[in-house]
Amino acid sequence: MAAPSFICLSLCLLVLCQGSLAQFSFGGQSAWSSQRSSAEPRCRFDRLDALNPSRRMQFEAGVTEYYEWDNEMMRCAGVAANRHILEPRGLLLPHYNNAPSLMYIVQGRGVMGTVFPGCPETFQSFQSFQQQSEPEQYMMEGETQRQKMMRDEHQKVHRFREGDVIALPAGVTYWCYNDGDVQMVSVQVYDASNAANQLEPRERRFFLAGRHESPRTGIYESEQQPIGMRQPMGNNIFDGFDTPMLAEALGVNPELARRLQSHNDPRGEMVFVKEGLKMLMPTRTTQEMQQQKFEESMQEPSMQRQYNMTNGLDEAFCTMKIRSNIDMPSRADYFNQRGSRVAILNSQKLPIMNIVQMSAVRVVLQRNTMITPYWQMNCHSMMYVTGGQGRVQVVNHRGKTVFDGLVKQGQILLIPQNYAVLKKAEHEMFQWVSFNTNQNTMISQMVGKNSIFRGMPLQVLMNSYRLSMEQARRLKFNRRNEMTILTPMYQMKSVE
């Protein structure tokens, strides 16, 4: 009888140990591990700058603005960033990147198509509309009943709106279309030092249509400069193939193959769709209602625990969710009575983050509110200001201030790994989104309930800083139960 009991006890201990280890791993990968390579091994982040776009390219249906890649801090971190402004009925042509990226929708709405290799070319197979009695749900926009049998099939189309974060793995083809009434503005950050990129550690875009501009050539283009006066544009990847061989591979005539090569197409990367884009997709209301219902159900802790359990695959690849909204107050992970909030999007909430190995944080600070001083333990962070302005200080390992200044709307600022940072909204609201180079960012806070001071004995604080017992107590407990978001001290006194 002793042997079976011993075996049963051993199995129980094994299950418990695996459950404990799971607390330190996410989606099969430890938060401590990194798949990144150093972009510039000898780099030192001795000086940081808040950057504005250094180059602006005007196309037929919009603008792409590039943040300077040759800036030392961008090269050292191995990241790149750009901002797209897409006009209504504008189409960002299909392309793919050599590096994974996250895209944040600053303004507007639209649709995005992604093409994952090996997935079926039918959209309906991924939607649960079988119970609906209205056949129009499956019809193309603008399609009549007579034309229904001639409709197209394609892979999944994703609707997005302001506040969405979209995860795009390296090498996956995607396109964007603005079906709204206002400009669609997005900012996109690429992790060029990710292991998925085995080219040089800088972002490259491979276009499948039209002609495009390299961000490393030419000069800053003004909005007024005519398209024909720009620097010569590069061609899409089809242009590099011999036309007869390309025609044979595609099974078309050489004239059609030359169309794909876009030799005489001056429109650039963004083009107008005159009659609007017609595609096979559910109605807007149906898809958005189902998406909202799913997202609301995911707010329940029991559902989050169930959804976060992984069998090593996380989700079926072809039906994987690529976007999540982090701008809604209900999504906040930290919130205070003055309306400041912090929302975190990592692989626990969006499993595709395990593939792109990035994460995002949305922060909204009311006037005079601060984020607790902290450092990021396992990643770099690219901060993009979406509204207002605020003061940011960054300190390196020698106690030297490498940045101290205002960061304004539209600017980006890199926060290197392990550098201490302090952020404060002063006379106006301060809003930003951070793009992190790890799918599960870990931070160490210096102030508040979850801080390093709370984790140290009073005697250690007294001897480290030559403090009295009372001073050490004030240092350790003065912020009481505040976490992440710090209320102005004068307001705390008035509440007391």
Image (cartoon, helix red, strand yellow):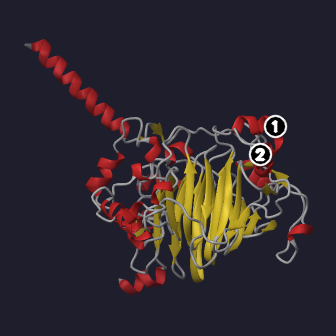
Check the image and report above or below for 428 versus 278.
below
Q: Residue at x 79, y 41 (%)?
A: 42
Q: Position of residue 211 (x, y in %)?
A: 80, 56
Check the image and report above or below for 3 versus 218.
above
> Between marks 1 and 2, how big is the CA–CA gap?
8 Å
Q: Position of residue 400 (x, y in %)?
A: 72, 59
Q: Which residue is mark 1?
A: 244
> What number of labels is visible?
2
* Element carrying mark 1: helix
Dividing the picture into quadrants, the one containing residue 466 is bottom right
Nearest the eye: 233 or 445: 233
Q: Which residue is mark 2?
A: 257
Is any part of residue 259 visible from this angle? Answer: yes
In the image: residue 422, left or right of residue 411: left
In the image: residue 306, left or right of residue 154: left
Nearest the eye: 347 or 335: 347
Q: Position of residue 454 (x, y in %)?
A: 41, 57
